[in-house]
Image (cartoon, rainbow, N blue to C red):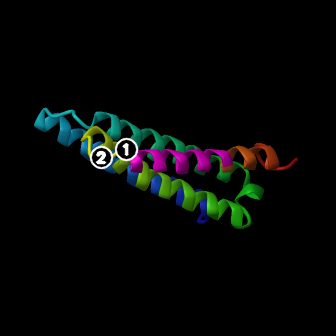
Amino acid sequence: MKGVAFNFFVTGAVFVTLGMLWGISMEISGDHTYAGAHAHLNLVGWVTMGLFGLYYSMTPAAAEGGMAKIHYLVSTLGVLVFVPGIVLAIARTTEALAAIGSLIVLASMLIFLWTVFRHGLGRPA
């Protein structure tokens, strides 16, 4: 099945694959400086996106319409801004991108919360 559920799940799988490669690279090099950013990539990029995908798969009415697509775009943007922002914060370059990214991730979760309240969980009876 294609659609927003598929998009969330595949994007999450791409993010966790990158996270695994990053983790392996850190282990091989012995440099775990960016472990926090790596963990957030796996948590927000895989776990959260995967759960969103499962929700939309279980609740197809929520996947219909524009809000689900907006949710997907906001969620993906959140990961793409937040994780590099954490890297820059750890490197003591700037914390601005991490702050902006965290707000985007929060916006994604608020969209999800609204969606769950609006559509419930699971297929309609």
> Which residue is at a point 54% across and 47% down the rendered structure image?
103
Q: Is residue 104 magenta?
A: yes
Q: Which mark is residue 95?
A: 1
| Residue 22 in the image, given as x and y percentages of width and height | 25, 44
- Would you say residue 121 is visible in this rendering? yes
As drawn, 44 above or below 64: above
Q: What element does badge 1 sit on?
A: loop
Q: Are marks 2 and 1 in contact (CB under 8 Å)?
A: yes
Q: Residues within 10 Å of mark 1 (few under 14, many from 20)?
A: some
Q: Dot 2: what SS?
A: helix
Decide which of 111, 91 is in the foreground and name it: 91
Count the marks: how many? Answer: 2
Decide: few, some or many residues near mark 2? Use Cα within 10 Å; few <14, some 14-19, many ≥20. some
User: Residue 83: x, y in percent?
Assistant: 38, 47
Tell me if I can see residue 13 in this picture. Answer: no
Quarter of the image with the N terminus is: bottom right
In the image, which is nearer the foreground, mark 2 or mark 1?
1
Q: Residue at x 32, y 41 (%)?
A: 89
Rendered position, 113 above or below 77: above
Q: Is residue 105 left or right of residue 22?
A: right
In the foreground, 34 or 20? 34
Read off the magenta span: 96-110
Instruction: Determine the CA span between mark 2 and mark 1.
Output: 7 Å
Residue identifier under label 2: 88
For image coordinates 70% across by 67% down, the residue present is 66
Percent of width and height locating residue 24: 21, 40
Circle on res. 2: none
Looking at the image, which residue is at 18% across and 42% down?
25
The kind of secondary structure the magenta stretch mainly shows is helix
Magenta stretch encompasses residue 111: no
